Amino acid sequence: MLRSRLTGEMVQFIPRAKNWEEAIRMASEPLLKHGYIEAGYVDAMISNVKELGPYIVLMPRVAMPHARPEDGVRKMGISLLITEDAVLFEGGKSANAFFVVAAEDATSHLTLLQEISDLLSDEEKITKLLGAGTYEDLLNLL
Amino acid sequence: MKLLAVCGNGLGTSFMLSLNVNKAMKELGIDGDCKNMDLASAKTESADYYIGSPEIMEQLEDGRKKVIPVVNMVSLNEIKEQLRKHILEVE
């Protein structure tokens, strides 16, 4: 599912982002542009982090910004942003990969999360993911 | 034993964590299961242990709840180590 959802137009590679807020905004752009989410969803993801802390950093260097379906999801989707320079969060956490998840309801995206979890549990794949510079590099990992 | 994986929304991070906590519990032979929930609901939900990222655990901690902080939500090794330290070595 990850492979079929994470199409070329949903993945971006950039040198750096000014801060974590900008990184989340940039990472969400493909979902916004293709009608998966509304602008309010992006704001909700950012205010979640401001309110509750950077719990979306799943592991060192990997973040999974998300909010609730009712915050503005039109259909289930996922996008990925990879930055060459680490983006800092409060509390010393940082990330180079941002998987933005838009869930339609509480259950439809669970397979997707399972697949992301499997990908992130594989150290070799993680290293390759963080070093990926093209969509082709990424496809080999999915 | 009831464990509760907690995150801001109870949808993404905590679900992913619960998958790995259940795996870790099985491997360590801890009886019970781990469900996932959002922070606001978890405050009034009873469980033997609450598990999640350090900043979420800090907000949940009320002096009575037993919390287990985890930094890497997908590292089976870290989760097992934390369960060992907080559950097995205490009981």
Image (cartoon, coloured by chain):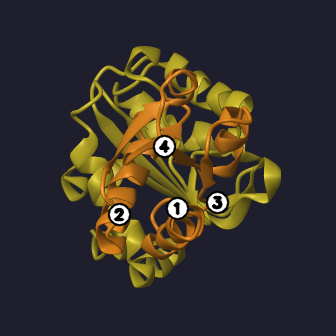
Q: What percent of the width, then of the height, locates residue A141? A: 31, 74
Amino acid type for the residue under numbered disc 2: Ile
* Image chain in yellow: A
Q: CA distance from mark 2 to mark 1?
A: 9 Å
Q: Which residue is mark 3?
A: A95
Q: Nearer the viewer, residue A84 or A56?
A: A56
Chain under numbered label 1: B
Above-or-below relation of B20 to A128: above
- Distance (Cα) linking label 2 and label 4: 12 Å
Local packing at callout 1 (Cα closer than 10 Å; few below 14, some 14-19, many 20+) is some
The mark found on residue B48 in the picture is: 4
Task: Identify the image quadrant of residue B19.
Answer: bottom left
Q: Chain of mark 4?
A: B
Are dots 2 and 4 in contact, CB under 8 Å?
A: no
Residues at circles 2 and 1 in contact by the CB criterion of under 8 Å: yes
* Residue at 50% from the left image edge and 48% from the top image edge: A64
Check disc 1 and report its element: helix, strand or loop.
helix
Q: CA distance from mark 4 to mark 3?
A: 32 Å
- Which chain comes out orange in the rendered image? B
- The answer as to whether the residues below labels 2 and 4 share one chain is yes
Number of the front mark, 3 or 2: 2
Inspect the image, locate mark 1, and give the three-letter code of the amino acid beneath it.
Ile
The residue where tag 2 is placed is B30
What residue is disc 1 on?
Answer: B87
Q: Name the image quarter holding residue A38.
A: top left
Residue B14, given in percent of the width and then of the height, sits at: 45, 43
